[in-house]
Amino acid sequence: RKEVEQDPGPFNVPEGATVAFNCTYSNSASQSFFWYRQDCRKEPKLLMSVYSSGNEDGRFTAQLNRASQYISLLIRDSKLSDSATYLCVVNTKNSGYSTLTFGKGTMLLVSP
Amino acid sequence: SQTIHQWPATLVQPVGSPLSLECTVEGTSNPNLYWYRQAAGRGLQLLFYSVGIGQISSEVPQNLSASRPQDRQFILSSKKLLLSDSGFYLCAWSVPRGYEQYFGPGTRLTVT
């Protein structure tokens, strides 16, 4: 099983649609979770951290299910500017230090 | 506020030539620093991370090396490039013992 697994997409949605991405992770000891956004040929940018109780930032809602080891991202009222690749990220302990493991990303294309 | 710089932005190098990519961070002290590579159509692969001057941990054995000569400077090097070294090289930083990482603009390397 891959450490962090995502549906590669692409997800093609019209403006205004609601879209959800899921991600599963294999390390049950993982403690921190994030969603990053990466535009074409650009660096990844932190979109939001994911907390156990779930959290919301404007049109974006992140959920964590530790028992099932999956993370979700919901985008409401999609905008053209939301078109990007969304990376699911999980922390991993390595020799006493934590490093991040990135999924390959899910591509979102929002059309007019 | 903190900023992270990388240069050059793009690079085309022949097989067998040396490589030196530089990353500097401003506005923070004693950051953790990371080098990632993103090959075409693939996820981010952690190459090296550093928790302090002269302290480098390697994640993947290969013909690349990293050095941290100053607190906020991280350098990625190779003595002889391979075709498989082509990719998008990203430097990132985090606060000590922090999980959230922030990326520089990246260097796009093409080995011909």
Image (tube, coloured by chain):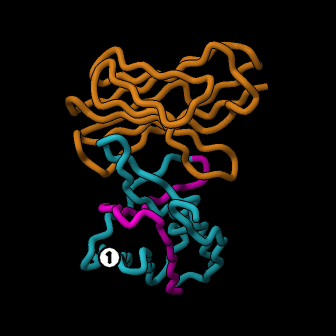
Q: Place residue A13 in its image quadrant.
A: bottom right
Q: Which quarter of the rendering shows the C terminus of chain B? A: top right
The residue lying at 65 percent from left, 72 percent from top is A9
Identify residue for label 1: A58
Q: Is residue A44 left or right of residue A109?
A: left
Bounds of the magenta span?
A17-41
Q: Position of residue B48 (x, y in %)?
A: 46, 32
The residue lying at 55 percent from left, 35 percent from top is B60
Q: Residues within 10 Å of mark 1 (few under 14, many from 20)?
A: few
- Which sits in the foreground, A23 or B26? A23
Q: Is residue B92 left or right of residue B36?
A: left
What's the chain of the residue with tag 1? A
The residue lying at 61 percent from left, 66 percent from top is A107
Specify the chain shown as orange.
Answer: B
A15 to B63, vertically: above or below? below
Q: Which residue occupies the extreme bottom position in the image?
A: A17
Q: Which quarter of the rendering shows the N terminus of chain B? A: top left
Is residue A30 a member of the stretch shown in magenta? yes
